[in-house]
Amino acid sequence: MRKAGLAVLIASLALVLVLSGCGKKNEDSGSGSDKVYRIASDATYPPMENMDKDEIVGFDIDFLKAVMDEAGLKYEVKNVGWDALLESVKQGTEYDAGISAITITEERKQSYDFSVPYFESTNMIMVKEGSDIKSAKDLQGKKIALQSGTTADELMTDILGKDSKGIKRFESNALAFMEMDSGGADAVVADIAVIQEYLKNNADKKYTGILDRDSFTSEYYGIAFPKGSELAEKLNPAIKKVLESDKYKEIYGKWIGGDPDMTALLE
Ligand code: ARG
């Protein structure tokens, strides 16, 4: 009887040890290689990111996949919209990072950590063919549709003044294009790849793109992280590898067309 009792005691002790050991192991793998990183995006900005039925597609999405594969990390991307993306990545509770053609700016660096730059861009003005608008300065007194909180917003607010009545700000760039289509705006200002994609898909609308390098200089996209994130350090080497690879050129050719100018990115 006493022997049996002891055996049961030993057996249950062993069970407790095994179970608590398992518990530890699960915790470890949860914060280790099995972690699924959550990435936020505003998928209304083709060809950079856009919804195709219920899937997010675009340059950024293929680029992110190449980087995460290179780094050996699991992730999922969610379309949350621009304002929510900026806010939630800043808070750092719900998302580990944001990818969304996000320009690295001095101002944003106060609130976010950024990866190394992975894409060169600039803003472009879209107007009706034959318009008297030839440069950013000509937008004085005109109605300009743009996505609020973007570099286009920042630049046009600088050029036209904070109180300018001409700037019509929208929650997404798709809405800015719609405003132009319905005659509510004389111009849309947005990233060059996005304007060029729109021109290509809407040839019937007789719009044209204006490049004004005096007012709009080069911008560089980065992946945005909450301040102090460790993920940035993990991803930078992977990003550099992808930038040097043929994969980057392939993704660029697929979504943007032609060959990328890598000079500034590989510096
Ligand atoms: N590059 C511009 C910026 O950072 C526009 C980005 C907008 N991106 C988007 N997915 N809507 O301000």
Image (cartoon, grey):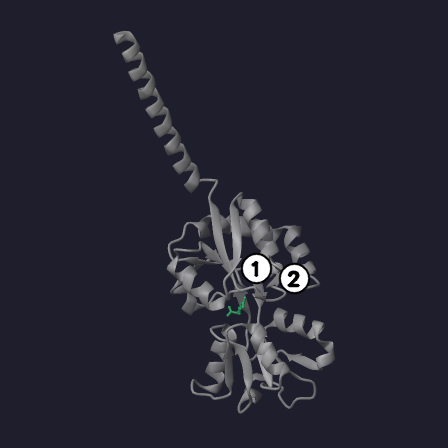
- In the drawing, does residue 242 fall left or right of residue 105? right
Q: State which tag comes first along the sequence, 2 or 1.
A: 2
Q: Position of residue 149 (x, y in %)?
A: 47, 73
Picture coordinates of residue 22, whole percent (x, y): 39, 30
Q: Nearer the viewer, residue 40 or 130?
A: 40
Which residue is found at the position 57% from the left and 59% from the top? 265
Asked if residue 252 is positioned above or below residue 166 in the image, the reply reads above
Q: Please state which amino acid type lies under the numbered disc 1.
A: Leu
- Which residue is identified by label 1? 265
What type is the residue that disc 2 sits on? Answer: Pro
- Taking the spot 44% from the left edge, 57% from the top edge, the residue there is 225
**Mark 1 and mark 2 in contact (Cβ < 8 Å)?**
yes
> How far apart in space, not on screen, are marks 2 and 1 (Cα)?
10 Å
Crowding at label 1, few (<14), some or many (≥20) Cα neighbours within 10 Å? some
Q: Identify the residue at horizontal 57%, vertical 76% (top origin).
A: 175
Report the residue marked by disc 2: 260
* Residue 108, quarter of picture: bottom left
